[in-house]
Image (cartoon, coloured by chain):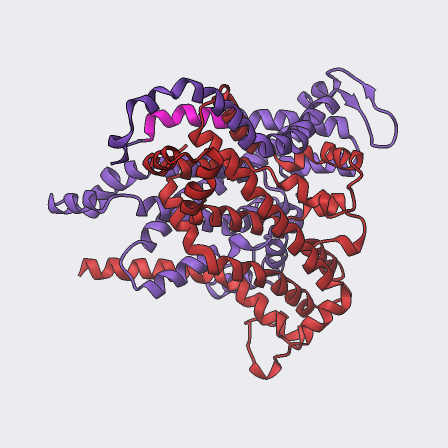
Chain colours: A purple, B red
Amino acid sequence: MTEEVVPPAVRRGAPPKKRKDGLAALGFLSPAIVTFLVFVLAPTLGVLYLSFYDWNLLSDGTFVGLDNFDRLVHDDRLLHVYGSTAYMALVILAVNVVAGLLLAVLLETRMSRWLRGFFRLSFLFPFVVSASAVALIWRFLLNKDLGLVNYVLGLAGLDRIDWLGSSAWAPVSVIVVNSWKTIGFSILVYIAGLQAIPAVLKEAAIVDGANAWTRFWRITFPMLSPTIFFLVVINTINSFQIFAEPRVLTQGGPGDASRTIVEYLYDRAFGDFDLGYASAIGITFMLVLIVLTAIQFRLSRRWTFYE
Amino acid sequence: MSRILARIATFAILVVAALAIAAPFLWIFRGAFSASDAELYKLPPTFSPGNLTAGNFGKVTDQVPYFRFFVNSLIVSTTITAAQIITCATAAYAFARLKFRGKNVLFAVVIGSLMIPIQVTIVPLFLVMSKLELTNTLWALILPGIFSGFGIFLLRQHFLALPAELEEAARIDGAGHLRTFVRVILPLSGPSIATLGILCFTYWWNDLLLPLVMISDTDRQTLPVGLVLLAGRFSTGSLGTIAAGIAMAIVPVLIVFIAAQRYIVQSIASSGLKL
């Protein structure tokens, strides 16, 4: 409407506006740029710098070139920890993306507003609680002899499981507790995505006689694919960075069964004060995350659908 | 018939999931009000109203300076939230609406910053803070939280979805970028700003790592550290006291969250969060 009253002369005034935009952009971006430079970029460059040094916080550091990276390549324990991190992260990712979608779809079926609100809130509950509090609670619940979980399993006639003490089950405990905490956020994002699908599409499909299964794969899934992709990216980044759960639940044990990269790095830095080596791990870990995300963006072109 | 079965199955799955998710909290709140620790260890779990007490909350405040921690957490979380909203909203406006050189590169940097875990940069961050002579002050907890790549991303997606006509109208009326931003964009962005605010507040309310590294005075610690201190005395203290401490840390975030959760769905739906 307003466009009709704009005299052409105003429109033609665009080129000088471009210079003004640059200045305005600088103004609008400056708080973000300053905080980014000082509290994100500088520490990141600091990590890169430290990765070429042998330094223990107290003495002066000595430059060791690529020694830290050489050590890293030959660190069998690190390789093992990468393996257990990937295992836990991928299962957590799958639980979030698949079970999250299932619960979100079920939540969007017809039910009373009150009931929907109740379910939604209980699913979101754990998301707002601190990871350390969550892990403390679960440490009691997963206790082999006194825990509620084994008691419930006992009622079902199953044997007690050594959730926190056996190398087969300790990573499962971390997976359960972290998925339990994060799935609420995935459900929330899914609900938002589902609500953004135009109702006419579904109605048209129903009129055409498509059953629920066909409707899901032909309409819901493609329309939801950007949301799924967003969750895959965010959940991958987050689940590879788990720290609090293994720390409080299992201390990474038994052995290294439930140890994550960030925990390993933290131990090298603040346990051994081997800061150069910890920094080298940090740098390579960041590269791994960047490569993973880049691959996901590449693959997404094949299966995500944008209007 | 099959439709009824499907509805029953739907309902059953939702109820089981809700129970599994909520059970640990019921356990915590029961523990917080329980007078005897022996009851908490009993299986099957029992619930006897006669055994209820508020005494555990008093024990929490006796063992650790709980209100000090609470106030510190409140100062840190609200300051970060306010600063983060300003920083992210202005940057998001520039990315969504302004034309300038290097925009795509800068935005890639914003997305890239999501991949830098704070645990990796914590050592140099500590060195930066000690250079600025801010360690052992609340500033050491506030300043590193202000920049948020996720926040810029979230708000940019939302601003992009706003109709451009409104701003053009404001522009024609002679409004500059700052006035357009404050008078047109911000008033239309309540839900997404609320979302960022809640996510930011709960994240920093719960953060454990930064206070552990930056703060050495007990008086300047925050609630999550307080919980660990409380749990550290587990061998001597009581389970009920720890439960009460956890409950007291949960309730404030829960209130904020319940009050504003509908905004989150709304804003994520309207921005689409498309990568």
Q: Which residues are magenta?
A: A291-304
Q: Residue at x 58, y 47 (%)?
A: B82
The foreground one among A268 and B73 is B73
Q: Position of residue A196 (x, y in %)?
A: 31, 44
- Up/down of B84 relative to A17, above or below: below
The number of numbered discs placed on residues in the rendered structure image is: 0
- Up/down of B105 relative to B275, above or below: above
The foreground one among A118 and A151 is A118
Q: Residue at x 26, y 32 (%)?
A: A5
- Classify residue A223 as left or right of residue A86: left
Q: Quadrant of the C terminus of chain A?
A: top left
Q: Quadrant of the N terminus of chain A?
A: top left
Q: Position of residue A30 (x, y in %)?
A: 59, 31
- Up/down of B186 relative to B39, above or below: above
* Residue A76 seen in the current view: no
Dominant secondary structure (helix, strand or loop) of the stretch shown in magenta? helix
- Classify residue A2 as left or right of residue B55: left
Q: Residue at x 53, y 24 (%)?
A: A23
The foreground one among A249 and A244 is A244
- Up/down of A115 relative to A285, above or below: below
Q: Position of residue B104 (x, y in %)?
A: 47, 22
The image quadrant that residue B166 belongs to is top left
- Classify residue B44 as left or right of residue A44: left
Q: Residue at x 76, y 53 (%)?
A: B220
